[in-house]
C-alpha cells in the first residue's frame, strides 16, 4: 500500500457543513472550544503534557469553519506527533471516537441548544475524516522511523552482525519471541543463526532437517510467506518443535537470484501472535527479508571467490597461494607444542612423458590420481598443496623424531609410484626440510626443499633427499644408533634396573619401577634418554619391550612368591599400547607365572602419549584390565597438555606427578599448590598419586605435609639391579596380606 495516498483524498468530501453551519461556527467557535477544553480528559495520564499543549489549538481549527488544505495538513502533523511520542494509535482512536459520539453531542445539547441541527452530523463526518488522516500521518511517521532504523541496520555489512539487529527488529515488529536464519544446504535446511531462542530450541534447531519439512520448508518450496498462527495444528507441525512449546511460526523466504536461498523464521512461544499484523509491519518484515537475502547472497559469492582463489581447480587441493600461510601456521604450532614438522617438496618423475605422449587429458587424470593417493598416504590434518604443474608441497606436522619423518616419506614415495601405461610408470622425487632445523622464512623453507628435491632427482628419482648438513648428519647418526641397537638386542646388552617406590612418611618400600638400561660395549651403562626415542621408531622396540615385560615378570614372580607383595610398575610405549596382539601375549606370559599378583601389576603410560588418541587408549586400557586384571598409571602427569579432564575416561588407577613439578617444590610456590591440588583431586577420584623425582629431604617433608602417600626418587634410592631391591627387602619385612 502506498503511503502517499493522502493526495487522493477529496478533502472537501469530509466536510458536510452547510453555509449556515459555518456562519454559526464562526460566531461561536470561542465558546464551543472553551466548553470542550473544560470537559475533555487526556486519553491516558501519561499523554497529559502533549494533550495540554496540543488540544486548544487543535479544537480551534476544528471549530473554525475553515477546512482547506492546511486543516488536513494539520491532521497529518497530529498523527506524526503521536507516532513520534510513541503513543499507541488505538488509544487516540478511542479518544477521538468519544469526542465524536459523546462529548460534542453533549456540549452542543447542554450549552448550545439553539445551534443548527445539521451541525452534529457535520462534526461526526469531519471527525471521521480527521481520524482517517491522523492515522495516515501516524503510519507515515512510523514508517519513516522504521526506515531510518533499517538504514541504520544496513551499516552492518556482515551477515553475522546484521542478523541479530535485524532479528531483534523483526521480533519487535511482529511481537515474536525468537528468530532464526535458516539456509538451504543441499537437500537439507540448516539453522545458521539464532536470535532470542532458548537453548533447548537451539538444540533442536541445530539439527539439519530435510528441506521439504516444516513451515520453513514450505515457505522455501513455495517461495512465499507462510504464517501458521496455530503451529501444533498446522500441516507443517514437527513434533519436536511442538514439544518445545512453539505456538506460532512465520516463515519469510529470503530472495536470491535463483529463488529463495533460505528463510527468516519468527517464532512465538510465550505469547500468541497478534490477531492482525498490520500492513506497515508486513512491509518492513519483507524489507528485512530482502536485505537478509542480499547479504546472504553476497556471502555465498565471497565464499565461492575465496575458495576459487585458494583452490586448485583440477585436483581440488589448496593451491600455492596458501602455502606460506600454512607453513607459518605449522611453525607456530610446532613452537607451541615443542614438536617438529617437515615440509616435503614433491616433483613427479616421468610426468612430462605422460603429457607429451598420452596427452594433456591423461596428464590431468594422473595428477588427480596422484593427489588422491597422496591424501590417503598422510594424516587428515596434514596439508597437501598443489604448488605448480606436477609439484606438490606436503606439510607433515606433529613429528616427534626425524625417524618418524623417514617412515612417512617412504609412504609418500610409495603412493606416488603409479603405472600410467603398460611398462610405463611415474614416481616422485622429494626434497625434505625439517622445522626447526631449518628455521628460515616460509619462502626459504620452500626454496630449500626445492633444492633438496633436485638432489633426489639427480640420484635418479623415486627417492628423497634432506636439505642441509645438520639434517643429514642427524640422520646418519640415527642410522648408526639403530644399527648398534640391533646388535645390542642380539648380544643381550639391555639390562633392567629397578627403583623403589616408598610410602610416606614411613619410607618403606611398597613398589618398584622397572627402568631399562643399555650396557653399551664402549660407552658404558646408558639411560633410555640416549636411545629410547630412536628405538621406539623401529620395529626393534617390539622385541625389546617384550624382553622388558618378560624380565620384569620373572622378578615380580620371585618377589611375590617370596612374600614381598610389591607393586610392580612397568613402562609401556605407544607401540605396545596400540598393538592388538600385546594383551594376548601378556596373558600367555602371565599364565606361566601364576605367583605374580596381577592386581599388583601397573603399566605406566606417558600422559602425552595417552591423550593423543583417548578413545583408542581408553579402549585398550579397558580390555587389558578385563583380560589381564592389571592396572594402568598415567606417567609424567602434568607435562602434557593436561589429561586432567580425561582422567575419568581413561580409567587409570593412578598418576605419577612429574619430577618437573616435584623438584622445585617450595612452600607457597605455584608447584606446591599444583601438587596439593593434584593430590586432592586424586584422593577425590580414589586413585593413587605417586610423586616422582624426590631428591632432597625437604621435598620429602613437604610432600608428607601435603599428604602425598607414595614417592620415588634419588633421595630414597637410585635405580639399581634387582639385587639392590633384594637387599632393601631384607632390611625391612614387607608383610603379605592374605586378602
Ligand atoms: P620415567 O618413567 O618417568 O622414569 C623415571 C625416570 O626418572 C627414570 O629415568 C629415573 O631414573 C629418573 N629418576 C628417578 N628418581 C629421580 C630423581 O630423584 N631425580 C631425577 N632427576 N630423576 C630421577 P630413566 O631411567 O633415565 O628413564 C627415562 C624414561 O625412559 C622413563 O621415564 C620412561 O619414560 C622411559 N623408560 C625407561 N624404561 C623403559 C621401558 O622399559 N619401556 C619404556 N617404554 N620406556 C622406558
Ligand atoms: Ca615411568
Ligand atoms: Ca615419569
Image: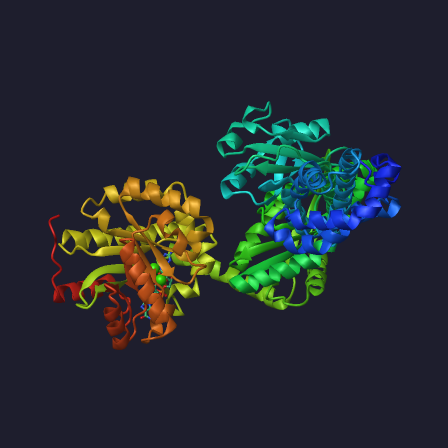
Q: Quadrant of residue 425?
A: top right
Q: Is residue 27 visible?
A: yes
Residue 365, image x, y percentages:
75, 37
Asked if residue 308 lies left or right of residue 397, the reply is right
Asked if residue 230 lies left or right of residue 107, the reply is left
Asked if residue 591 lies left or right of residue 644, the reply is left
Residue 716, image x, y percentages:
24, 70
Figure colour scheme: rainbow
Residue drawn at x 23%, y 48% as measured from the top left: 599
Residue drawn at x 78%, y 45% as measured from the top left: 137
Q: Is residue 80 visible?
A: no
- In this view of the protein, which residue sits in the foreground, 71 or 4? 71
- In this view of the protein, which residue sits in the foreground, 246 or 176? 176
Residue 158, image x, y percentages:
71, 51
Figure check: 188 above or below 67: above
Figure check: 260 above or below 30: above
Q: Quadrant of residue 609?
A: bottom left
Figure check: 104 above or below 635: above
Looking at the rendered structure, the number of numbered marks drawn on it comes to 0
- In this view of the protein, which residue sits in the foreground, 338 or 9? 9
- In this view of the protein, which residue sits in the foreground, 177 or 131? 131
Residue drawn at x 66%, y 39% as measured from the top left: 94
Regarding ligand 3, which quadrant of the image does it lie in? bottom left
Asked if residue 507 lies left or right of residue 193, the reply is left
Quadrant holding the N terminus: top right
Amino acid at each position: 500500500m502506498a503511503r502517499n495516498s493522502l493526495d487522493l483524498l477529496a478533502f472537501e468530501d469530509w466536510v458536510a457543513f452547510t453555509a449556515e453551519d459555518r456562519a454559526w461556527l464562526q460566531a461561536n467557535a470561542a465558546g464551543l472550544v472553551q466548553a470542550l477544553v473544560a470537559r475533555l480528559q487526556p486519553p491516558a495520564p501519561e499523554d497529559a503534557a502533549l494533550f495540554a499543549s496540543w488540544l486548544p489549538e487543535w479544537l480551534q481549527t476544528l471549530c473554525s469553519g475553515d477546512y482547506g488544505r492546511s486543516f488536513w495538513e494539520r491532521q497529518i502533523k497530529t498523527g506524526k506527533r503521536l507516532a513520534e511520542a510513541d503513543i499507541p494509535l488505538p488509544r487516540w482512536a478511542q479518544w477521538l471516537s468519544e469526542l465524536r459520539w459523546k462529548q460534542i453531542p453533549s456540549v452542543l445539547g447542554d450549552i448550545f441548544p439553539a445551534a443548527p441541527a445539521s451541525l452534529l452530523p457535520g462534526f461526526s463526518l469531519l471527525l471521521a475524516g480527521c481520524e482517517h488522516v491522523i492515522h495516515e500521518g501516524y503510519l507515515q511517521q512510523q514508517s519513516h522511523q522504521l526506515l531510518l532504523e533499517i538504514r541504520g541496520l544496513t551499516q552492518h555489512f556482515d551477515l553475522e552482525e546484521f542478523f541479530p539487529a535485524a532479528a531483534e527488529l523483526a521480533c519487535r515488529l511482529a511481537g515474536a519471541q525468537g528468530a532464526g536464519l535458516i539456509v538451504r544446504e543441499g537437500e537439507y535446511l540448516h539453522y545458521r543463526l539464532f536470535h532470542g531462542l532458548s537453548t533447548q530450541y537451539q538444540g533442536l534447531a541445530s539439527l539439519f532437517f530435510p528441506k521439504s519439512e516444516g513451515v520453513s520448508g514450505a515457505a522455501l518450496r513455495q517461495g512465499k510467506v507462510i504464517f501458521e498462527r496455530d503451529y501444533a495444528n498446522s500441516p507443517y507441525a514437527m513434533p519436536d518443535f511442538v514439544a518445545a512449546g512453539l505456538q506460532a511460526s512465520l516463515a519469510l523466504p529470503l530472495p536470491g537470484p535463483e529463488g529463495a536461498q533460505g528463510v527468516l523464521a519468527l517464532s512465538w512461544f510465550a505469547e500468541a501472535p497478534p490477531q492482525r499484523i498490520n500492513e506497515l509491519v508486513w512491509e518492513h518484515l519483507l524489507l528485512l527479508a530482502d536485505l537478509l537475502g542480499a547479504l546472504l547472497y553476497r556471502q555465498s559469492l565471497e565464499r565461492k571467490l575465496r575458495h576459487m582463489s585458494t583452490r586448485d581447480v583440477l585436483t581440488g587441493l589448496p593451491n600455492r597461494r596458501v602455502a606460506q600461510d600454512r607453513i607459518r601456521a605449522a611453525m607456530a604450532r610446532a613452537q607451541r607444542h615443542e614438536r617438529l614438522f617437515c615440509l616435503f617438496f614433491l616433483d613427479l618423475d616421468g610426468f612430462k612423458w605422460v603429457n607429451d605422449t598420452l596427452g594433456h587429458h591423461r596428464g590431468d587424470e594422473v595428477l588427480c590420481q596422484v593427489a588422491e593417493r597422496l591424501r590417503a598416504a598422510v594424516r587428515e590434518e596434514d596439508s597437501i598443496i598443489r604448488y605448480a604443474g606436477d609439484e606438490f608441497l606436503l606439510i607433515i606436522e606433529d613429528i616427534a623424531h626425524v625417524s618418524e619423518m623417514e617412515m612417512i616419506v617412504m609412504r609418500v614415495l610409495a603412493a606416488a609410484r603409479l603405472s600410467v601405461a603398460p611398462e610405463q610408470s611415474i614416481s616422485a622425487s622429494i626434497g625434505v626440510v625439517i622445522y626447526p632445523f631449518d628455521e628460515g622464512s616460509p619462502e626459504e623453507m620452500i626454496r630449500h626443499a626445492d633444492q633438496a628435491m633436485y638432489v633426489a632427482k639427480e640420484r635418479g628419482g623415486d627417492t628423497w633427499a634432506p636439505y642441509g648438513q645438520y639434517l643429514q648428519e642427524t640422520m646418519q647418526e640415527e642410522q648408526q644408533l639403530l644399527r648398534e641397537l640391533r646388535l645390542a638386542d642380539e648380544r643381550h646388552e639391555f639390562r633392567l634396573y629397578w627403583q623403589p617406590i616408598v610410602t610416606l612418611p614411613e619410607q618403606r618400600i611398597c613398589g618398584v619401577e622397572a627402568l631399562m638400561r643399555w650396557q653399551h660395549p664402549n660407552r658404558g651403562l646408558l639411560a633410555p634418554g640416549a636411545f629410547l626415542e630412536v628405538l621406539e621408531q623401529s620395529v626393534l622396540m617390539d622385541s625389546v619391550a617384550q624382553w622388558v615385560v618378560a624380565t620384569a615378570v620373572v622378578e615380580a614372580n620371585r618377589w611375590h612368591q617370596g612374600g614381598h607383595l610389591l607393586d610392580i610398575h612397568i613402562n609401556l610405549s605407544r607401540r605396545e599400547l596400540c598393538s592388538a596382539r600385546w594383551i594376548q601375549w601378556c596373558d600367555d606370559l602371565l599364565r606361566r607365572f601364576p605367583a605374580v599378583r596381577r592386581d599388583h601389576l601397573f603399566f605406566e603410560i606417558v600422559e602425552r602419549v595417552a591423550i593423543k588418541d583417548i578413545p583408542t587408549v581408553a579402549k585398550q586400557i579397558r580390555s587389558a584390565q578385563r583380560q589381564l586384571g592389571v592396572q594402568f598409571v598415567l606417567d609424567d602427569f602434568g607435562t602434557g597438555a593436561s589429561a586432567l579432564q580425561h582422567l575419568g575416561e581413561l580409567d587409570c588407577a593412578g598418576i605419577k606427578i612429574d619430577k618437573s613439578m616435584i623438584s622445585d617444590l617450595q612452600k607457597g610456590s605455584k608447584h606446591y599448590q599444583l601438587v596439593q591440588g593434584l593430590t586432592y583431586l586424586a584422593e577425590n577420584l580414589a586413585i593413587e598419586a605417586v610423586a616422582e623425582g624426590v631428591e632432597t629431604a625437604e621435598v620429602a617433608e613437604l610432600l608428607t605435609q601435603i599428604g602425598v602417600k607414595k614417592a620415588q626418587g634419588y633421595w630414597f634410592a637410585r635405580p639399581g639391579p634387582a639385587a639392590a631391591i633384594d637387599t632393601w627387602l631384607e632390611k625391612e619385612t614387607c608383610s603379605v596380606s592374605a586378602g
